[in-house]
Amino acid sequence: MCVVEVFLIAVSLALDAFAVSVSSGIAIPGFGWKQAVKMGVWFGAFQFAMPLAGWLLGSSVSGYIQAVDHWVAFGLLALIGGKMVWGALGRGAGEEDEAPADLSPRRLCLLAIATSIDALAVGVSMAFMKVDVWFSALVIGVVAFVLSVVGGLAGRRLGALFQRRAELVGGLVLIGIGVKILVEHTLGG
């Protein structure tokens, strides 16, 4: 997996955190740099840790399913991406996710877990690919941090429409990478 693919996966995974940050920036009075960085640290840390945990889980079973590993990677990425697309298209035009009322550690932890579950599944799929998992996890964590900070600070201006589009684009990118993996393994080798 090349650096560009890792970056695209990182951006796709961070779009949930970005969307939550945008809605937080909209909903929390006085949202500023301090709150944005706080969210970025939580989301970035979880986005870094989850692919590592997923990779460890996937590595433990990779020897048993090596013949179908590309199908597993495709299935996981397509499932995650499809869920994101479904969520983006299933929301009504005026609907938006409920934003958190505050940024307590408990609420931030729950949001960080919820927005990084996809990264766990991607980590599992990475166990079946030739990828430097530490580098990939670092890129995923840094991108999540940056997009969370940017999303929070821009939240008051962007609104729910952009949130929906970001989730749709992220889902489509994950599905596209899954298809690319499948095509490379079935046609290329």
Image (spheres, helix red, strand yellow):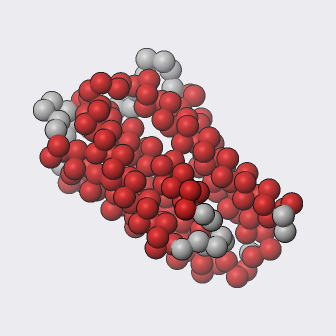
**Which residue is painted at 35% across and 26% down in the image?**
158
How many marks are shown on the rendered structure? Answer: 0
Image quadrant where one finds the C terminus: bottom right
Measuring from the top left, give residue 74's x and y in whole percent.
Answer: 70, 57
**Which residue is painted at 24% across and 29% down in the image?**
27
Position of residue 79 relative to residue 71, above or below, is above
Quarter of the image holding residue 81?
Answer: top right
Side (left or right) of 139 relative to 105: right
Measuring from the top left, give residue 172's x and y in whole percent.
Answer: 62, 41
Measuring from the top left, give residue 71's x and y in whole percent.
Answer: 75, 61
Judging depth in this view, the residue of 78 and 135 nearest the camera is: 135
Quarter of the image holding residue 160?
Answer: top left
Quarter of the image holding residue 44?
Answer: bottom left
Measuring from the top left, give residue 176's x and y in whole percent.
Answer: 67, 47
Side (left or right) of 96 relative to 129: left
Work out whether residue 99 can be spotted. no
Side (left or right) of 189 relative to 149: right
Judging depth in this view, the residue of 3 and 88 nearest the camera is: 3
Position of residue 98 relative to residue 4, above or below, is above
Q: Residue furthest top?
A: 94
**Which residue is painted at 56% across and 56% down in the image?**
4
Image quadrant where one finds the N terminus: bottom right
Work out whether residue 152 can be spotted. yes
**Which residue is painted at 74% across and 64% down in the image?**
70
